[in-house]
Image (cartoon, rainbow, N blue to C red):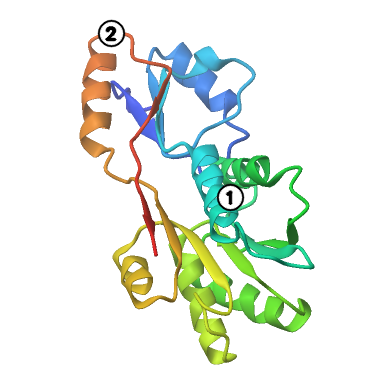
Amino acid sequence: FIAYRVDVIAFVPIVADGWDNVLREAKTAGIPVLVTDRKINTEDSDLYSGFIGTDSEQEGREAGRFLLRKFAGVERKRPIRIVELAGTEGASAAVGRAKGFREVLAGNPDFEIVYSESGDFLRSKGYEVMLSVLEKVPRIDAVFSHNDGMTLGMLDAMKERGVKAGKDVVIVTIDAEQAIIDALRAGTVNFVIECNPKTGPDIMELAKKLAAGEKIPRLIHVDERVFSE
């Protein structure tokens, strides 16, 4: 894109690190860069013009708060045992969701994350990881999955092993794909956090401003809803 001398570059970084050199090239070429969907780490924040996307830390907080509500008032002699299906290692979405989730549960001895593994945001990996978890982890009370794709694979694995998702194990997931909303209605998922993908029109408006030499906000988080049982 730099070689083609485009007016604006908007891109989704799969991982958060490693962008400084190419961003410097874009800045030297006078091309403003808009980061979308996932955030990046840079030595100099002025290397890009702004970010628009979801607040992944808030998504993680919503997941943690639901579990606090779900198990509130339930007498128990042992902590709630939680398995985390994490997203791609190094991705800002995975880092933020894990951070926000732990922030809410921190200092609460009634909740314990007993296992966490990356499923790379893939349905196939969600299936594989959950099959392994069901063999390794003796008791699971809840699962926090970083995206619906992994959750759908996880649900396949649970069904295959005779585990009643949504009943035997509380399921919390992020994205709000239609298949997961259907699973919520069917009772196999307990809580869904929307990852709002409808940023296209906003990205175009921001790109127009950048092309015209205007400043844009450094950080824009899109609105997101939650859906509960």
In three-dimensional space, the C-alpha distance between marks 1 and 2, rounded to whole angstroms, equals 39 Å
Can the viewer see residue 139? yes
Above or below, 46 against 14 in this view is above
Q: What residue do we see at 73% from left, 77% from top?
A: 139
Q: Earlier in the sequence, mark 1 or mark 2?
A: 1
Please name the residue that numbered disc 2 is placed on: 214
| Whole-percent x, y for residue 77 in the image | 79, 68
- Amino acid type assigned to the residue bearing label 2 in the image: Glu
In the image, 104 versus 7, the foreground residue is 104
In the image, 11 versus 39, the foreground residue is 39
Which corner quadrant of the image does residue 208 belong to?
top left
- Amino acid type assigned to the residue bearing label 1 in the image: Gly
Left or right: where 152 falls relative to 154: left
Which corner quadrant of the image does residue 57 belong to?
top right
Left or right: where 97 falls relative to 195: right
Left or right: where 27 falls relative to 169: left
Please name the residue that numbered disc 1 is placed on: 64
Q: What residue do we see at 29% from left, 15% from top?
A: 210
Left or right: where 202 falls relative to 150: left
In the image, 226 versus 88, the foreground residue is 226
| Whole-percent x, y for residue 65 in the image | 55, 48
Above or below, 113 against 90 in this view is below
Above or below, 157 against 107 in this view is below
| Whole-percent x, y for residue 176 in the image | 36, 58
